[in-house]
Amino acid sequence: MPEVFTDAVALADLVRTGEASPLELVDAAIARIEAVNPALNAVIRDRFELARAEAVDNLPDGPFRGVPILFKDLGCEMAGEPLYEGMQFLKDHDYRPAETDRLAQRFLDAGFICLGRTNTPEIGLVPTTEPDSYGPTHNPWRAGITSGGSSGGSAAAVASGMVAVAHANDGGGSIRIPAAACGVVGLKPTRGRVPISSHMTEISNFLIAEGVVTRTVRDTAALLDVIGAPRPGAPTQPAPPEVPWGESLHVAPGPLRIGFLADAPTDPGTLAPECVDAVERTAALLQGLGHHVEASFPNSWSDRDAGRRFSAVWAADCAYAVDDWSQRVGQPVTEDDVEPLTWRLAAIGRKVTGPQFIANVADALVASERTGQWWRPDPAAGDGFDLLLTPTLGEPPVPHGTFASSRETPLAGFVRAGAFVPFTTQANVSGQPAISLPMHWTTDGLPVGIQLMAAFGREDLLLRVAAQLEAAAPWADLVPPTHA
């Protein structure tokens, strides 16, 4: 049988060559989940018997035939199967979608076998995974520490070796934040690259991107080849890659011009020293790999109004989500049905008028256009930068309860989150691709991620440079204390 941290590409090869059967891979992953999950609470609902049955049925002959995967309990809808999005309201009503959405179908068509659902904060609102409905997910590197959010269950499951890959999504950093907190790889693709949930569009929910968390760059690239094609008729249609992303890893990116930012863009001097150190070490490593690296970042990142615009859109999205679930379930969501932050943000979102929402989105997109001028869309296109290097987070993973809210102070956790995530929301507003890589650890053993951000549609550059960094400073052999 494969080792615990065999990646998805290697697992697929085992099935393809007959060295392992899909059922053997499924049984091994189930055993790992049963051994480790009680300590982490990353998987909150399993479908083990369905998965075993699917493993011996006629699986699609896709590139990942027989490889186990976990789906985040937010999005990636499967017909007739529970979907709760961290909400006690949906859990109480046992909500089950009528249709399988495009993204879930792409995973299934590729041959993946879903073993269950991973924990997420309510509607994915905060950068930690501690919902009232299922309780906190622990970080595999230390109990009582956040695994990040909102894809914290997925990241903890991958980091601990339960599975090689897990579904994740990102509306303000929710792939990259938990990737950094748990020491795994997390790519937020370009806006429109991967279809979002069936009841959303890239216009009404333009901040959201779908993807995965993995332990290796080649898994991230290979998965993007599986899921990374816009839905037909989507309003945003990023250009396809010239060669498949998985193959592009073998193409040297050439010397690139890389800017780096080792300070909080709107609150200088507030970053944790470990995060500054992570960026400076990575900048030196990139310089040693032949890239030109200099301190620089887009001027628009210093705009304090950007946070206000993001918060207004985020609140409106929250109100939309609450109203949408009321409609889909057929019963109004009340204050008693949701956590204090959800109710308060939804109330704020309902006060955002239609013209105000459009104005905020328009301002954000104009600012994004100005920001985009800092990048160059092609390495041969003259002045400009190819990549921006930043910390992923403003501080190492924090203790559980740091982002807690109450009925008396419903916004306390949301406000506190600003210092934790000063670098991730910008890519959601602009739609640019960004990746978090586990390049550093604190002296007491917690992961510190770095983020690379590219021009719109340039996942190829991110993945090639990520592969260079992975080869120069390997992280796959670093195993958390809690692992399968």
Image (spheres, grey):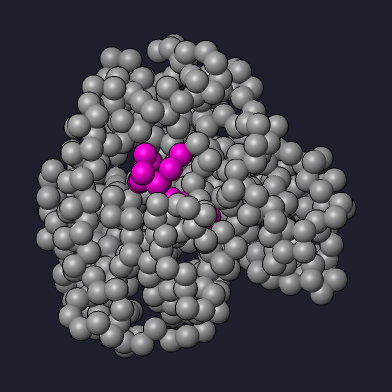
Q: Is residue 251 above or below residue 89?
A: below
What segment carries the magenta color? Answer: 200-212
Position of 316 relative to 39 (above/below): above
Q: Residue at x 55, y 47 (%)?
A: 154
Q: Camera-side residue: 125 or 59?
A: 59
Instruction: Say left or right for 41 vs 306.
Output: right
Q: Quadrant of residue 456?
A: bottom left
Camera-nearest residue between 42 and 373: 373
Q: Residue at x 44, y 77 (%)?
A: 464
Is any atom of residue 175 visible in this view? no
Q: Considering the image in quadrants, where does the N terminus appear?
A: bottom right
Main SS, magenta region, reads: loop
Side of 16 where 351 appears, left or right: left
Is residue 45 part of the magenta span, yes or no?
Answer: no
Q: Nearer the viewer, residue 132 or 187?
A: 187
Is residue 305 visible from the viewing direction of this image?
yes
Q: Residue 326: x percent and y percent?
A: 48, 19
| Residue 18 rendering spot, x and y as whole percentages | 85, 71
Q: Position of residue 448 (x, y in %)?
A: 37, 58
Query: In the rendered structure, does residue 210 fall within the stretch colored magenta?
Result: yes
